[in-house]
Amino acid sequence: MLLLIFGPPAVGKMTVGRAVADASDFRLFHNHMTIEPLLELFGYGTRPFNILRDEFRIRIVEEAAASDVRLVFTFLWPLDDVDDLAVVESYIAPYVDAGKQVAFVELAAPLDTRLERNRTEHRLAHKASKRDVEWSDGNVREAEGLVMNTSPERRTVAEDLLDRHRFLRLDNSALSPAESAAEILTWLSAG
């Protein structure tokens, strides 16, 4: 099984993913596992950074699928971007092609909660690029202009993909990582 956790910056994707892995046989692959080493070499958003980030992620997912690894993969996903939709489809293809289940969990929390989480030691320990917290806070605020969560008021291009797979939207603003993980694992076991 491939469990994809997405949502806006600092919503708790990595932390909840770690809690899911700690409470189950899932293994965590969070997006900064590919981002941090590439930043050192190429800089964020450059052509080689983007190419290698996606190639590394796809290869890791391919090997996990081939090895029957139950994988939690966390990442940021602008839901109204057609190019990002194609990238996400390439991420899930190894599991889909192998006939394995794919599930999506969307985390949601208000900006003030995410700004508070942005400064936690756990986050900063695993994401060196976020240690400049003033810059990182600005990045969290800037992302407010992107569509990072679903809404009944609008439909995004990503939702056709979400409709084809198991999908849970979880407001984790008042939940601990362990509580969020428990809800996710209960939801997975029910279906």
Image (tube, rainbow, N blue to C red):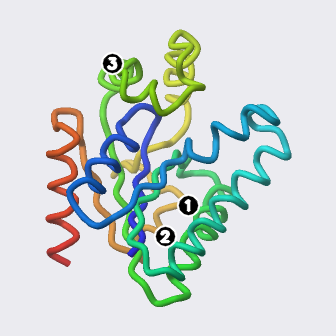
Using the rendered view, name the quadrant where residue 68 is placed.
bottom left
- The location of residue 26, given as percent across then percent down, is 33, 64
**Residue 25 left/right relative to 61:** left
Residue tagged 3: 116
Residue tagged 2: 160
Q: The residue under label 1 is which amino acid type?
A: Val
**Residue 94 left/right relative to 8:** right
Residue tagged 1: 157
Label 3 to label 1: alpha-carbon separation: 30 Å
Q: The residue under label 3 is which amino acid type?
A: Glu
First in residue order: circle 3 vs circle 2: 3
Kindly identify the residue that appears in the image at 43 percent across and 74 percent down. Answer: 69
Q: The residue under label 2 is which amino acid type?
A: Asp
Kindly identify the residue that appears in the image at 59 percent across and 69 percent down. Answer: 89
Mark 1: few/some/many CA within 10 Å (<14, 14-19, 20+): some
- The location of residue 169, given as percent across then percent down, is 29, 54
Location of residue 106 with respect to 148 vertically, above or below: below
> In the rendered image, which quarter contains the C terminus?
bottom left
Number of dots carrying numbers: 3
- The location of residue 121, given as percent across then percent down, is 37, 21
Tag in front: 3 or 1: 3
- Secondary-structure class at tag 3: helix
Q: Nearer the viewer, residue 66 or 133?
A: 66
First in residue order: circle 3 vs circle 1: 3
C-beta proximity under 8 Å, tags 2 and 1 = yes
Kindly identify the residue that appears in the image at 38 percent across and 63 percent down. Answer: 104
Label 2 to label 1: alpha-carbon separation: 6 Å
Farthest top residue in view: 134
C-beta proximity under 8 Å, tags 3 and 2 = no
> In the rendered image, which quarter contains the N terminus?
bottom left
- The location of residue 128, given as percent across then percent down, is 56, 26
